């Protein structure tokens, strides 16, 4: 193994402390457009952190597979004959062709379209056409399997993978403080969460971090970027929705956190509008939460949105809202591919499922009234960052600087902040900087 | 093809071309009036599946758009409000509708299938094409034609941009 310090990424990493100063609330525009910094991110961020791969409900039976990306690396996740879930590079060990060319399906093996090498769904090379003659029987198949992602771990059905063999366990990476909140999304569903349709995919010509930092707790933008949603009555007064944001170790951030009772009251109000089935449903979920989580968590009842570092954002507003995941897949410094998956309670009445599903399409999805306005911002920001003079003007993340830690809510874990603050952005870039300036072993 | 069907297809083409022109000219109130109050407007998500595993779009699965005339009207209200940043200023669009096939229905209705290419140009240099097909059920009462069901199938697996225009 070569030490990473001998590689060109170090040149890009050097000087990052001058470009990214979370404690002063400034980040240079350069980190959103620079090719060398971007390549360093693929190495030091996307091969060192836990990345979302899929959900167990997408790989129910042995042989089921799905494809995804880890950074720019294409991967296949499979459920093997032994029931185990594996993640491997979707690239032939011979000369790199993708061995799986579909989104998802069921197969015991993957055959490379180029020369026909065949891999079992656990990644072993099991067939090489004419191996006896063309390789004189000397090919060591055991060394030529699909490259396995060494660490795969699952939290409550959500499958994550990590290229770093020495990574801390997934639960520790997510952290107990963050999971205290996220568990509400996982424990509330009466029948468990299930994927409710295909993954939605679209491109935004913008740097991936702009979307990640936004979901990490940029609640301030909601007031104006999503002003149209308030204007047409799609959302109530924003100040009635939530009170805080919070951030956690490893760069994670969360927005639209509400005081105990508020989210429940909002759901009750919604249920009255939706009808008797909805009123019963809210009551059933509340009972379930009271039985499964702490009294304070149950009182908290609902979440908002957040970002699991680096590029997995989520949204979940109350029991009538899907749990939506957004992967901001990097495609060069100036472009991302958004992969959106939606989950809902398999045990909810059909009328509630219908409501949650259609509301998510209309709200924060590829054609939703929120997502399209966010994308417009991210694109024009990225475009503006390319100017020579523009680059001398740092982005400003100073909101709430010098006032961190002033907000407390009895029993709420994590570093809480007021509803409108850029503390979570600073937390995101602090961890980003830590990883980016930490040389590691080359994979 | 009988003369009757040829005439009917011409009428349908005329209807779809006029609709396309309304959208290209952003005459949204007129466009909304083309739909029945209980229209089912549906745009499922396209996937890349194995050849031996073709897949129909199932009602009830998460879709790009799944709405009624009430929410379509909300979208128009949003555009009119001046805060819909993704269409502020408006995109320039040009719609091309073709391959129109008509199947008359039992009552005063018909099913029209068509293909489309939509060019979208935003600001200075954001340009993309959206390509797909539509299947419309159109009520053809004497008071005027109305779209009662529309299914839009985009051929893209990865959309070139978030959708801020209509199909
Ligand atoms: S590249 Fe896969 S078999 Fe040759
Ligand atoms: Fe937003």
Image (cartoon, helix red, strand yellow):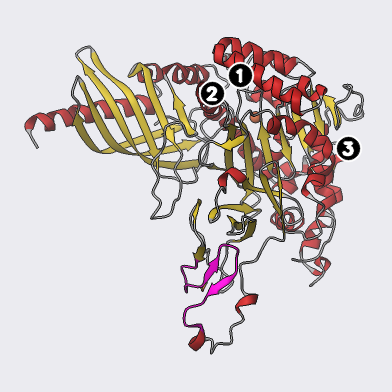
Quadrant location of residue B73? top left
Query: Residue A24: which numbered mark, if any?
Result: 3
Q: Disc 3 versus disc 1: distance between alpha carbons?
A: 47 Å
Q: Disc 3 versus disc 2: distance between alpha carbons?
A: 50 Å
Q: Secondary structure at mark 3?
A: helix
Residue A4 in the image: x percent, y percent?
80, 66
Q: Considering the image in quadrants, where does the N terminus of chain A appear?
A: bottom right
Q: Are marks 3 and 2 on the same chain?
A: yes
Q: Secondary structure at mark 1?
A: helix
Please state if B34 lies on the left or on the right of A226 as rendered.
left
Specify few, some or many for label 1: CA neighbours under 10 Å numbering under 14, 14-19, or 20 or more.
many
Q: Which residues are magenta?
A: A111-131
Marks 3/2 in contact by CB < 8 Å: the verdict is: no
Query: Residue A281: which numbered mark, if any?
Result: 1
Please state if A294 lies on the left or on the right of A306 as rendered.
right
Q: Is residue A122 magenta?
A: yes
The image shows residue A364, relative to residue A47, as above or below, that is: above
Say which label, 1 or 2, has the lower sequence index: 1
Query: Residue A349: which numbered mark, if any?
Result: 2
Residue A331 in the image: x percent, y percent?
61, 51
Quadrant location of residue A223? top right
**Mark 3 close to ligand 2, CB under 8 Å:** no
- Residue name at image x 33 percent, y 25 percent: B149
Magenta stretch secondary structure, dominant: loop
Q: Nearer the viewer, residue A175 or B104?
A: A175
Q: Chain of mark 1?
A: A
Q: Nearer the viewer, residue A247 or B106?
A: B106
């Amino acid at each position: 193994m070569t030490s990473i310090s001998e590689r060109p990424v170090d040149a890009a990493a050097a000087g990052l402390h001058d470009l990214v100063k979370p404690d002063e609330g400034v980040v240079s525009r350069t980190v959103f457009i620079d090719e060398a910094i971007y390549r360093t991110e693929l190495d030091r961020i996307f091969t060192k952190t836990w990345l979302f791969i899929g959900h167990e409900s997408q790989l129910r039976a042995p042989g089921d597979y799905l494809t995804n990306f880890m950074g720019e690396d294409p991967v296949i996740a499979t459920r093997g004959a032994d029931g185990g879930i594996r993640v491997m590079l979707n690239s032939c060990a011979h000369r790199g062709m993708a061995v799986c060319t579909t989104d998802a399906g069921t197969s015991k093996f993957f055959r490379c379209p180029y020369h026909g090498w065949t891999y079992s769904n656990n990644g072993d090379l099991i067939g090489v056409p004419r191996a006896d003659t063309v390789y004189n029987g000397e090919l060591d198949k055991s060394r030529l399997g699909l490259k396995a992602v060494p660490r795969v771990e699952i939290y409550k059905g959500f499958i994550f993978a990590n290229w770093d063999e020495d990574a801390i366990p997934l639960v520790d990476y997510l952290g107990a403080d963050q999971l205290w909140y996220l568990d509400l999304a996982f424990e509330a569903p009466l029948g468990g969460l299930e994927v409710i349709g295909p993954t939605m995919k679209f491109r935004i010509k913008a740097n991936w971090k702009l979307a990640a930092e936004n979901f990490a707790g940029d609640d301030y933008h909601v007031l104006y970027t999503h002003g149209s949603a308030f204007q047409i009555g799609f959302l109530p007064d924003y100040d009635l929705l939530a009170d805080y944001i919070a951030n956690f170790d490893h760069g994670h951030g969360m927005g639209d956190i509400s005081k105990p009772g508020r989210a429940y009251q909002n759901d009750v109000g919604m249920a009255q509008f939706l009808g008797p089935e909805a009123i019963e449903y809210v009551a059933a979920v509340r009972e379930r939460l009271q039985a499964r989580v702490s009294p304070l968590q149950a009182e908290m009842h609902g979440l908002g949105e957040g970002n699991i570092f680096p590029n997995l954002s989520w949204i979940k507003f109350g029991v009538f809202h899907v749990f939506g995941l957004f992967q901001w897949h990097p495609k060069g410094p100036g472009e991302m591919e958004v992969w959106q998956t939606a989950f809902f309670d398999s045990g909810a009445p059909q009328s509630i499922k219908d409501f949650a599903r259609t509301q998510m399409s209309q709200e924060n999805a590829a054609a939703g009234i929120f997502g399209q306005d966010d994308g417009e911002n991210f694109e024009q920001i990225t475009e503006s960052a390319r100017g020579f003079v523009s680059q001398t003007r740092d982005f400003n993340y100073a909101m709430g600087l010098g006032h961190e830690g002033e907000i407390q809510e009895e029993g709420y874990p994590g570093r809480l902040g007021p509803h409108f603050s850029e503390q979570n952005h600073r937390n995101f870039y602090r961890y980003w900087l830590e990883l980016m300036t930490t040389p590691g072993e080359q994979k | 093809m009988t003369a009757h069907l040829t005439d009917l297809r011409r009428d349908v083409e005329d209807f779809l071309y006029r609709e396309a022109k309304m959208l290209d000219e952003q005459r949204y109130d007129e466009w909304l009036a083309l739909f029945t109050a209980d229209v089912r407007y549906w745009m499922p998500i396209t996937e890349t599946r194995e050849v031996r595993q073709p897949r129909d779009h199932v009602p009830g699965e998460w879709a790009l758009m799944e709405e009624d005339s009430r929410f379509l009207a909300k979208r128009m209200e949003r555009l009119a409000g001046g805060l819909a940043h993704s269409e502020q200023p408006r995109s320039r669009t040009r719609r091309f509708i073709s391959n129109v096939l008509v199947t008359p229905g039992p009552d005063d209705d018909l099913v029209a299938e068509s293909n489309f290419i939509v060019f979208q140009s935003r600001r200075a240099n954001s340009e993309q094409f959206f390509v797909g097909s539509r299947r419309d059920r159109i009520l053809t009462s004497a008071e005027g034609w109305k779209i009662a069901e529309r299914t839009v199938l985009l051929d893209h697996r990865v959309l070139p941009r978030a959708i801020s225009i209509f199909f």
